[in-house]
């Protein structure tokens, strides 16, 4: 990869912080460079540069905040992603879209890339809306994944929510390997199926993390969005 010709949106986010350690030559941009909800700003930025690929990670990512501010989720996750797709189409740039495991209903787990999608909250609907736009562009890669900080930031963790989540440092290394293959289509990136509580304890077994149920919170989350990552494993290995 020619890192100097790659643009990464959402350059101040958690994922970007880890990407910078692995791909330091990439151009990390955020709203200071352009607002993704405004196509003209993106277009003005793109036409002045030689860009080979966009890694689109900019998003409004908090499920409870998306429930309270759905219009913000629409602007960032649906309209913003649609604008990135149109810009990449115009300038013939490859687009990699960072999506979420939450596009699935969560009623069975171990989801494959071609399994039916059915979000249970507004955050996930907005990310799926962005994915729909990306699917309109053949020269694109959709990465459905889930990650968290390298240190679990909460006092409690779900014992009844199943996931393929890994620390951001692990997930970024996996994503970079996928980017190096220069593939298109949809790939699931994650670890083995586990509860969020098990994931949290795996980061630091000495930390006192209390148990929590998804039924004790005031916003809806899917029960089991664990991912089948065999397609990724076959390609990489």
Image (cartoon, rainbow, N blue to C red):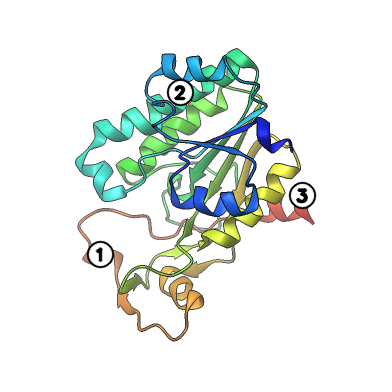
Pinpoint residue 110: horizontal percent, then vertical percent: 55, 58
For the residues bearing labels 1 and 2, Cβ distance under 8 angstroms: no
Secondary structure under the numbered disc 1 in the rendered image: helix
Spatial CA span between label 1 and label 2: 34 Å
User: Which residue position is annotated with label 1?
Assistant: 215
| Vertical relation: 9 (above or below) 162 | above
For discs 1 and 2, the disc positioned in front in the rendered view = 2
Q: Residues within 10 Å of mark 3 (few under 14, many from 20)?
A: few
- Tag 2 residue: 82
Establish if 213 lies above or below 140: below
Could you tell me residue 220's position as x and y percent? 28, 53
Q: Residue at x 66, y 30 (%)?
A: 5
Which residue shows up at 54% across the image and 66% down it?
193
Residue shown at the point (59%, 17%) measured from the top left: 89
Instruction: Inspect this view and state whether residue 195 appears.
Output: yes
Instruction: Name the residue carrying label 3.
Output: 235
Q: CA distance from mark 3 to mark 2?
A: 28 Å
**Residue drawn 65% across the image and 18% down it:** 92
């Amino acid at each position: 990869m020619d890192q100097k010709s790659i643009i990464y949106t959402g350059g101040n986010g958690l994922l970007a912080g880890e990407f910078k350690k692995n791909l330091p030559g990439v151009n990390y941009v955020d709203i200071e460079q352009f607002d993704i909800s405004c196509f003209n700003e993106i277009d003005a930025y793109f036409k002045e540069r030689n860009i080979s690929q966009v890694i689109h990670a900019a998003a409004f990512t908090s499920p409870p905040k998306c429930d309270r501010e759905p219009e913000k989720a629409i602007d960032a996750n649906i309209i913003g992603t649609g604008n990135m797709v149109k810009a990449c189409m115009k300038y013939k740039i490859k687009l990699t879209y960072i999506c979420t495991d939450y596009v699935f209903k969560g009623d069975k787990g171990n989801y494959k890339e071609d399994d039916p999608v059915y979000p249970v909250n507004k955050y996930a609907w907005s990310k799926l809306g962005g994915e729909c736009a990306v699917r309109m562009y053949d020269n694109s890669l959709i990465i459905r994944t889930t990650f968290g900080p390298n240190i679990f930031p909460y006092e409690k963790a779900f014992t009844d929510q199943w996931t393929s989540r890994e620390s951001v440092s692990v997930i970024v290394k996996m994503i970079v390997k996928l980017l190096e293959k220069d593939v298109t289509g949809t790939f699931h990136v994650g670890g083995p199926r586990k509860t969020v509580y098990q994931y949290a304890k795996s980061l630091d077994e000495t930390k006192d993390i209390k148990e929590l149920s998804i039924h004790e919170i005031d916003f809806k989350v899917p029960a089991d969005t664990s991912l089948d990552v065999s397609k990724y494993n076959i390609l990489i290995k």
